[in-house]
Image (cartoon, rainbow, N blue to C red):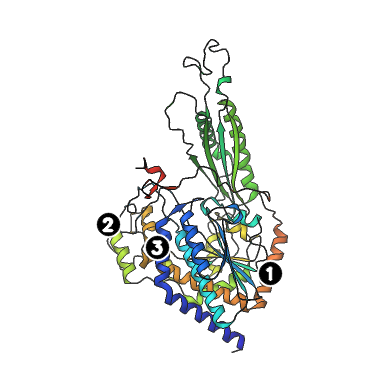
Amino acid sequence: MTDAANLTDAAKATAREWIDEHMPELSAWHQRIWDLAEPAWREHESAAWYVNLLRERGFEVEAGSAGMPTAFCAEWSNGAGPRLLTYAEYDAVPGNCQSASSHLAPREGLPAEAPGHTDPHSALGISTLAGLLATQHAMREHGIPGSLRYTGEPAEKMHGSKVVHGLRGYYDNVDAIVSFHPFYMLPLCNTARLDTQCGAYYSKVYEFVCDEPETWQLTANPNSPIPASHSAARAPGANIALMQMHSASRMMQDAMLPSVGGWSLSDAILSSGQATADNLPARIARIQYSWRTPDIEMAEHVLAVLDRNAEHAAAMAHCRVNDTWIARSRPGLTNHVMTDVLYRNLEQVGAPTYGEDAIAAAQEIQRQLDIEPMAKPFLDECERLISPEDAERELREHMPAWQRNWTSDDYVEMTHYAPTVRFYISRPALKPAPGRGAYPGWVMNALGGIPAAIDPTIEVAGKTVAGTFIDLLLDSDALARAGEEFSRRSAEASLAPLLPADFEPPVELAWPEYVRDAEGKRRWLGAGALG
């Protein structure tokens, strides 16, 4: 064995030992982020936690990077060498407040409509943090030169931050990127993506504003001393425009795109703070549309329909319409060299395994649901690897031959700046009981907060990130080949950013958030009066 191989093996062993020694600490860190469960663009305490910890560990950290208050960019260097990047996510989803328990219940002191970690992004961030700090430790111990960059990426559920970080240059001068996500669909469990990457994602808010209601019918009551008489015909107002937009777009959904290709369209009506029960026309109403498509052309067809519907809904209701882009992401670029390097490291680490405590927690959930507890309650796929080639083949069985990409995630923007690999480690998921169908959604959410069940994900993912980083730091040939493949695929795709360089992140919109009451107690804003 060569000296280089000896160094690589020794450094990987050092990194894995660091994670083993620090698993209790990593588990506690995860519980902290899981409990905070802050939603998109409002992850203030979660981001501050990461910033403070990284500074304590010797990283130089820019808080609020790229004009996003809950983003950050951290860097640590051990001398001239490759610069490698991974990242944290930490946004949660409103309406999914679940305790780390065996039954349906919100976390203590919060209503069910508060946010919770569904994927869970809490484990995503702590897993990559584990890999980052383990690599840093190995670099120090073995004198390995290079730099580590770590970004905090808020609002992933809206594809919010990565396009902005990319436009502002935060992924420039990076030699390779490792992207991790806890598994969320088979066959992408304990593997890495090969050729089928995530597709395009667009998200836009349409705001209807009725700011001249007095001009609706000028002759309806010309003698009234007030602009909108109680006896006059009132302008329809913003709520009517929103409902016209919502109804028309729902009715036209089948006319937007063919019923193939795995595309989807979602809508969300945003709060505008108008619960006053007044008798005036609604002045402002907002609706957000988000759509996932295999390619940009399909996304543009949906955009054209929505823009047209918004224009006419506004005209019907005596409103004007403003629109605000939330996200606009390109399909991803694959990199076989990066996939090979990462999967070799995953093979060395092995799939997660679930101990007695995790099995007991899973069995108790089954009892609560009147399911006979299983001796092996977790999906078999959670505890075994699947090669990227086999996962690719199974994935393609569900797709039309013409379709190149499937579902969406904003890691795709990173793939246009540096060689990137996307990999998945199992999160705990239960075997379905015969004749019972899928488990309630709260079950996976709860398992994501039970340490015995989620810690194996953090351990395996962290060790895989660290091993991959060490290979890329020490194997200049592999890094060069990854760069050459990136250059070739970028030239072939020729996809420029879909938003302008001066695009401003939509942080000022009225997104849901926690607040502090007069006693300093943390409350969910939708939970009612504050003290």
* Mark 1 touches mark 2? (CB < 8 Å): no
**Along the line of sight, the residue nearer the viewer: 131 or 468:** 131
Task: Say what secondary structure mark 1 lies in.
Answer: helix
Mark 3 or mark 1: which comes first in sequence? 3
Tag in front: 2 or 3: 3
Task: Say what secondary structure mark 2 lies in.
Answer: helix
Mark 1 or mark 2: which comes first in sequence? 2
Tag 3: residue type?
Gln
Residue 227 position (above or below residue 95): above
Residue 447 lies, in percent from the top left, at 37, 61
User: Residue tagged by mark 1?
Assistant: 483
* Mark 2 touches mark 3? (CB < 8 Å): no
Left or right: 343, with 460 as reference point: right
Left or right: 309, with 100 as reference point: right
Tag in front: 1 or 2: 1
Residue 276 lies, in percent from the top left, at 43, 30
Tell me which corner region of the image, top left, top right, bottom left or bottom right, holds residue 377.
bottom left
Residue 514 position (above or below residue 47): above
Tag 2: residue type?
Gln
Mark 1 vs mark 2, CA separation in Å: 52 Å
Residue 366 lies, in percent from the top left, at 30, 59
User: Residue tagged by mark 3?
Assistant: 31
Tag count in the figure? 3
Mark 3 vs mark 1, CA separation in Å: 37 Å
Task: Say what secondary structure mark 3 lies in.
Answer: helix
Q: Residue at left 56%, top 73%?
A: 468
Q: Can residue 306 be seen in this view?
A: yes
User: Residue tagged by mark 2?
Assistant: 368
Q: Where's the C terminus, which quadrant? A: top left
Tell me which corner region of the image, top left, top right, bottom left or bottom right, holds residue 487.
bottom right
Residue 399 position (above or below residue 254): below
Residue 410 lies, in percent from the top left, at 57, 56
